[in-house]
Image: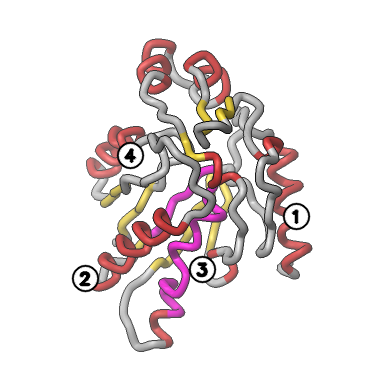
Amino acid sequence: MATLIFIPWHWNTPACYDAFIDALSAYGFTGATVILPYPGCDAATYDFVDEITLLKETLTGLSRIRRDVILVLHPQGKRRSLSAKDLGNTQRAERKLQSGVVRMIFFMAFMSPIGFNPTNGDEEVAPDSAEFQMERGIVSVNDDESMKVFLQYLPASEAQHWAARMLPQSVGVFWSTSNYTGWQNIPSKYLLHSDNRLFRVPYAHYKLEHTRRVSGVF
């Protein structure tokens, strides 16, 4: 059975998945998450190099012990799918290697084609609720906005708990260039969420269709 690897979204630590991973375990599924370097940082980072390296090491380690992996990605999953480059099950089989990333699940992820390069300093690529501190190179979201935009489906007390644990995020990750998209080589699913407030379902459909059209994938 494949191991599910959950990638935390902006401003969050891996702890946000703990209860879900425990619930999966009760049904016989194996889940894990990773500690990413950019939430909680206090300086601008303009690419995903450190993050992708860490994720790739995690996925490679699982492949070495012959564990198939399902990668579950949130809003910036498109860029974090870089970590799966050359680790797809089919790609590894071509090199006579066993196991690898058998599927990717994008959960309301911001999709864009290869080569998409937002302008540095363009705040339009971030959620309206984001608060930029350009002199420090970070972007954060306050507790009230977190509860309205990200945690609205939780009971108030639980939403407050998680809102208080959100960390500043480096601004640069919003402006890094997309030079690989895992879904081109690895079977993938895109999950929609009707009450998502980061961006709505019609916009998610638009980004998906635009990415498919520009990438020549239909």
Please name the colour scheme applied to the rendered image: secondary structure
- The answer to which of marks 1 and 4 sits earlier in the sequence is 4
Distance Cα–Cα, label 3 vs label 2: 20 Å
- As displayed, is residue 192 above or below residue 146? below
In the picture, the disc for residue 209 is: 1
Q: How far across and down, in percent of the image, does residue 108 sit?
A: 58, 42
Name the residue tied to disc 3: 186
- The answer to which of marks 1 and 2 sits earlier in the sequence is 2
The answer to which of 132 and 76 lies nearer the viewer is 132
Mark 1 near mark 4, Cβ–Cβ under 8 Å?
Answer: no
Q: Bounds of the magenta span?
A: 70-91
Mark 3 is on which residue type?
A: Ile
**Few, some or many C-alpha atoms within 10 Å of disc 4 (few <14, some 14-19, many ≥20)?**
some
Residue at 32% x, 48% y is 34
Distance Cα–Cα, label 3 vs label 4: 24 Å
Q: How far across and down, in percent of the image, does residue 94 sit?
A: 43, 87
Label 2: which secondary element: loop
- The answer to which of marks 1 and 3 sits earlier in the sequence is 3
Name the residue tied to disc 4: 14
Label 3: which secondary element: loop
Q: How many labels does the image show?
A: 4
Residue at 73% x, 40% y is 203
Quadrant assignment for the C terminus: bottom right
Residue at 58% x, 32% y is 134
Distance Cα–Cα, label 1 vs label 3: 18 Å
Residue 52 in the figure: left or right of residue 65: right
Q: How far across and down, in percent of the image, does residue 6 sit?
A: 38, 47
